[in-house]
Image (spheres, rainbow, N blue to C red):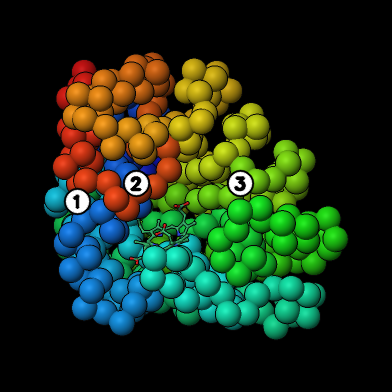
Amino acid sequence: MKDIDRAIKFAAMSIKNDLLLRAAKGEKTSRTPVWLMRQAGRILPEYRAVREKLSGFKELVETPELAAEVTIQPVDILDVDAAIIFSDILVIPDAMGLPYEMIEKKGPHFPNTVASPGDIRKLKVADPSELSYVYDAIKLTKAELDNSVPLIGFAGAPWTIFSYMVEGGGSKTFSKARGMLYTNPADSHELLDMITSTTIGYLKGQIAAGADLIQLFDSWAGVLPPDHYSEFSLRYISRICDSIKEVPITVFAKGAWFALAEMETLSCRTVGLDWNMNPADAKKILPGKTLQGNLDPCVLYGSNEQIEEETRKMLAQFEGHPHIANLGHGVYPDTDPEKVKCFIRSVREFSSR
Ligand code: CP3
């Protein structure tokens, strides 16, 4: 038995609801497991109540007891088949020496950015212990979950982290980050390499603390041309996948439908699909992977009947292939939690075999 199979088997043995881990392994399950990207967050009034009492987002991320509390909220309230640790992908640049701020209603902002080779020299590959507050949150969450459902750990893919460090926040064009790949490929690789090394140490820390599965979020995959995506993103994702043998990995590369064939060659177990991707094509291109996704998050603005209908259609499209139900990207903050519950109920009901 390979190390990864042994690790998954052990985890699955001890977790009561092991649907996610079994589906990730490619096994047939009694029904399709379901969770939502960004389920721990602003859609829940219970989250907003915790958040309101604090100085800001970072305090929540950096206080393990509170991070554990909001991680468990969606498991209790929404009845999902997995928890995802409450944190942010931006803890990585922070630990490397580039701090972020979370600005209310606007999103992340970096007071300093990477604009020249000199800026890269000021950064470091972070020692994994710098992120011990995340490992503590994982340990507390695992204890509180008491093996009811698996806990997902996560990190941003190096290209997405690179984009934030160069752009200083979100962007419409990503012209600074994409431009640097042309004007300064060697330094771009150096920075991506540092992010990758930091991320591997960080993910190993999450796994040692108890994470049962890891998801890599490449949120800005879709802005790169295919050859640059292979060279500046997939190369580093591949290194991370090859370094993590302890638990199954999911790679979610938003907008990277052009790279699905290459993803079949990654040593990850699951590939996430966004709502632009066609499940029928993905099933053919990725015969060896479990697929995750891919309902348009906007379906949840519709009526319960529409949600049931669209969920049924989505499940039918993945029929015959290992599948983890999810949205095609994070749930939007103005979504009614009752509609999320309707989606989850629909998956449970319509996928039962
Ligand atoms: O999925 C979960 O429920 C776990 C928690 C989680 C957060 N961020 C908490 C958060 C996860 C997995 C993330 C990942 C993340 N963070 C991504 C990748 C996923 C994706 O959606 O593409 C990205 C790109 C970020 C960066 C980030 N963090 C942005 C752009 C923003 C602002 C806009 C937004 O989506 O809310 C954040 C803030 C953030 N991260 C919030 C939460 C709950 C909202 C902040 C608040 O509570 O005020």
- Callout 3 secondary element: helix
Residue 271, x across and y down, in percent: 49, 37
Residues at circles 3 and 2 in contact by the CB criterion of under 8 Å: no
For residue 329, side relative to residue 67 (left or right): right
How crowded pointer 3 is (Cα within 10 Å; few <14, some 14-19, many 20+) is rated as many
Q: Name the residue under label 1.
A: 75
Q: Out of 201 and 10, give the one closest to the viewer.
A: 201
Q: Provide the secondary structure element on which disc 1 rests.
A: helix
- Residue 221's label in the rendered image is 3
Q: Nearer the viewer, mark 1 or mark 2?
A: 2
Say what secondary structure mark 2 lies in: loop
Give the residue drawn at x 29%, y 42%: 35
Depth check, mark 3 against mark 1: the one in front is 3
> Is the Cβ of the residue at disc 3 closer than 8 Å to that at disc 1?
no
The amino acid sitting under disc 2 is Val
Q: Quadrant of the C terminus?
A: top left
- The span from disc 3 to disc 2 (Cα, nearest Å) is 19 Å
Mark 1 or mark 2: whose residue is earlier in sequence: 1
**Residue 67 to residue 63: above or below:** above
Q: Which residue is drawn at 45% across and 65% down?
A: 107
**Which amino acid type is marked by label 3?**
Ala
Answer yes or no: is residue 195 visible. Answer: no
Residue drawn at the location 64% of the way across and 65% of the way down:
167
Q: Where is residue 137 in the image (x, y as percent from the top left)?
A: 30, 70
The residue sitting at 18% across, 59% down in the picture is 45
Q: Mark 2 points at which residue?
A: 331
User: Could you tell whether 73 is left or right of 188 in the image?
Assistant: left
Q: In which quarter of the image is residue 314?
A: top left
Relative to 72, 166 lies left or right: right
Split into quadrants, the picture shows ligand 1 in the one at: bottom left
Mark 3 vs mark 1: which is more N-terminal? 1
